[in-house]
Amino acid sequence: MPFTHVAALLPLDTLGHYLHWHFIEISVANFIVIVLMVATFITALVAPFPGRRRRKENQ
Amino acid sequence: MSYTEIERQWTTRLRRRFVHLLPPEKLLPDTQPTYVSSWIYVFGVTTLSALVVVIASGSLLALRGPQWWHTSSVGHFVNSLHLWSVEIFFFAMVVHLWGKYFMAAWRGGRALTWMTGVVTFLTSIAAAFTGYVSQTNFDSQWISTQAKDGINATGAGAYFNVLNMGQMLMWHILLLPLAAVVLTALHVLLVRIKGVVPPFEEHVEVNA
């Protein structure tokens, strides 16, 4: 796919989108990054780590 | 040179102190405790790996200069590599920070490890900021003119002028990366000395 087609999917020359909640104002892009960080953190806590069971059995 | 003289040499004493503090098997251990086999322990080394890419891509940008990273396709690629490795660096560092915060990673005499991590985080924010104002494009002009009032309000503007492109570039490519790398090395060495923080012990209630 040519670069211009990709750029058309994600236009970067438009005004940013912002979320407002009382005194809190945050761009949608930053909000998505924070949501992804929280999701990664929770996944890291609950996702099984490869080889963990085998290591425990060996001990 | 007598044996006593060798014993009194500062190099001998310093080497013994280092080896006592961090013997080779602790500096490069063969294994880690079982509790380290969790995804939450992965983000420290992810941050470290991203830092290596940040420094390598930044070095390439420094070698070729702004005309290259603004106009050539390879330059655009390396420029993007530098940006996205920084994004991953901060992303992983924040998850690492949350993980360590909820583990109370300063336990067991690890206060200095925690504090070097905090200072490295703050130094990295300053390094990223000076990078944004050193891009030599409209974005960097916008960010620096927006930031100047805030910086000047703190009084730091007399020494740290965000509109001074040369000064910001020097901070970005020498002082702050040097500080970040030295602090990171110190942080990793402290982790090696004290070991990775264990999870909280489970309190089992025994019914009589």
Image (spheres, coloured by chain):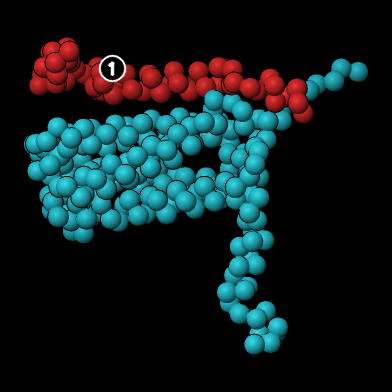
Chain colours: A red, B cyan
The amino acid marked with disc number 1 is: Trp
Residue B143 in view: no
Disc 1 chain ID:
A
Q: Position of residue B24 (x, y in %)?
A: 63, 54
Which quadrant does the N terminus of chain A fall into?
Answer: top left
Q: Report the residue at 14% width, 55% height from top.
A: B166
Q: Is residue B47 above or below residue A3?
A: below
Outermost residue, bottom side: B1
Along the viewing direction, whichever of A27 and B94 lies nearer the viewer: B94
In this rendering, position of residue B15 left or right of residue B154? right
Name the quadrant containing residue B146: top left
- For the residue carrying disc 1, how many other residues have a C-alpha within 10 Å: few (<14), some (14-19), or many (20+)? few
* Drawn side of residue B169 relative to residue B94, left or right: left
- Answer with left or right where residue B126 lies relative to residue A36: left
- Taking the spot 50% from the left edge, 48% from the top edge, the residue there is B187
- Residue drawn at x 21%, y 32% is B77
Image coords of residue B158 (percent x, y)? 18, 58
Identify the residue at horizontal 27%, vertical 34% (top origin). Answer: B81
Could you tell me residue B93's position as x and y percent?
A: 42, 35
Residue position for label 1: A21
User: Can residue B45 be seen in the rendering of this structure?
Assistant: yes
Quadrant (top left, top right, bottom left, bottom right) of the C terminus of chain A = top right
* Coordinates of residue B147 in the picture (x, y in percent): 18, 42
Q: Is residue B171 above or below residue B9?
A: above
Pick the front one: B182 or B98: B182
- List the single residue furthest toward the right: B208
Vertically, is B48 above or below B193?
A: above
Disc 1 secondary structure class? strand
